[in-house]
Image: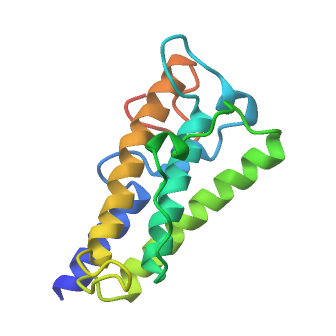
Amino acid sequence: MLNESFARTLVKSLQGERGHIPIKNAIADIDWELSGKQVENIPYSIYQLVMHMKYWQDFLLLGLHGEKPQLPAHVKESWPVEHIAKNQEEWAEIIRQFLAGIDTACTIAQTTKLDEPLARYPDITRADTLRNIASHNSYHLGEIVLLRRLFEAWPPPSGGYPA
């Protein structure tokens, strides 16, 4: 019972329910041009933020699947140098893969024992890893929303709060 309740809570956190706008609603309508826009004194574009989120989400999902990916030598390796994707098609595929990763994390939350340790990281549970994905994505989603507001591209068509 507790596992089911916590699994539902994790899924809501992973999808962005309750605490903020759902992640898919906040990013799905961002086009290639907007993704690469930059603001003076702001270190990252939306593209770079999404790529960084995807990097760590993919990394943590590998751990959930029993793999032990190599940690980067420095965190800067998890940030792309380029500020924009090559084109709209590449950007759309990045968004598709990122959202698919969230779906994968939600499936893991709903179908596995959350208190079970990871195969390659015995001191870390599935719940720890899923919570890490959710909180990391939420943190950077706030930056994406702020950038959208600065570019007067908020709220998204699905609506958003605050408007």
- Asked whether 79 or 1 is in front, the reply is 79
Q: Quadrant of residue 153?
A: top right
Vertical relation: 59 (above or below) 37: below
What is the number of callouts on the image?
A: 0
Of the 4 image quadrants, the one containing the C terminus is top left
Q: Position of residue 117 (x, y in %)?
A: 28, 83
Q: Position of residue 80 (x, y in %)?
A: 62, 39
Q: Residue furthest left?
A: 2
Q: Is residue 163 left or right of residue 31?
A: left
Q: Which residue corresponds to the image point at 50% horizontal and 64% vertical from the top-left?
A: 70
Q: Quadrant of residue 120?
A: bottom left
- Asked whether 70 or 48 is in front, the reply is 70
- Asked whether 144 or 81 is in front, the reply is 81
- Asked whether 56 or 92 is in front, the reply is 56
The colour scheme used here is rainbow
Q: Position of residue 69 (x, y in %)?
A: 50, 69
Q: Position of residue 4 (x, y in %)?
A: 26, 84
Vertical relation: 23 (above or below) 37: below
Q: Is residue 117 left or right of residue 79?
A: left
Q: Residue furthest top?
A: 40
Q: Which residue corresponds to the image point at 79% horizontal and 48% vertical from the top-left?
A: 90
Q: Is residue 126 left or right of residue 146?
A: left
Q: Which residue corresponds to the image point at 42% horizontal and 40% vertical from the top-left?
A: 140
Q: Which residue corresponds to the image point at 59% horizontal and 46% vertical from the top-left?
A: 51
Of the 4 image quadrants, the one containing the N terminus is bottom left
